[in-house]
Amino acid sequence: MGTVVEALLARVQAARSGLASALEAEDPYVVAVAQDELDDAVRLARRHGLDVEAAGAGEE
């Protein structure tokens, strides 16, 4: 797996983890920021041809 692919998958996984933490904190602003980060990470990964679900980035 290439370095760029690994970095993109790590970003998606970190964003998902951040969103989960934000949801636990029940802070609407932090949830919104975390959701935006996840949306950006997933969009960028898909733009590079990665299926983030099939690649295992959805595992927490």
Image (spheres, grey):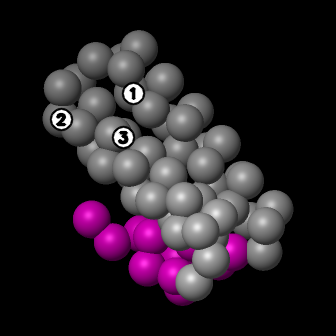
Say whether residue 59 is left or right of residue 57.
left
> Mark 2 sits on what residue?
24
Assign a secondary structure to mark 1.
Answer: helix
Q: Reading the chain from its start, which is encountered first: label 3 or label 1?
A: 3
Residue at x-position 62% and y-position 77%: 2
> Mark 3 sits on what residue?
19
User: Is residue 23 placed above or below 7 in the rendered structure?
Assistant: above
The question of residue 20 being in magenta is answered with no
Residue at x-position 28% and y-position 31%: 22
Q: Amino acid at mark 3?
A: Leu
- Residue range in magenta is 50-60
Residue at x-position 52% and y-position 82%: 55
Q: Amino acid at mark 1?
A: Val
Give the quadrant of residue 37. Answer: top right
Cα–Cα span, label 3 and label 1: 6 Å
Q: Amino acid at mark 2?
A: Glu
The local crowd at label 2, few if under 14, some if 14 to 19, many if 20 or more residues have their Cα within 10 Å, is: few
Cα–Cα span, label 3 and label 2: 9 Å
User: Is residue 23 placed above or below 52 in the rendered structure?
Assistant: above
Report the quarter where the N terminus lies. Answer: bottom right
Q: Are marks 3 and 1 in contact (CB under 8 Å)?
A: yes
The local crowd at label 1, few if under 14, some if 14 to 19, many if 20 or more residues have their Cα within 10 Å, is: some
The question of residue 57 being in magenta is answered with yes
Cα–Cα span, label 2 and label 1: 9 Å
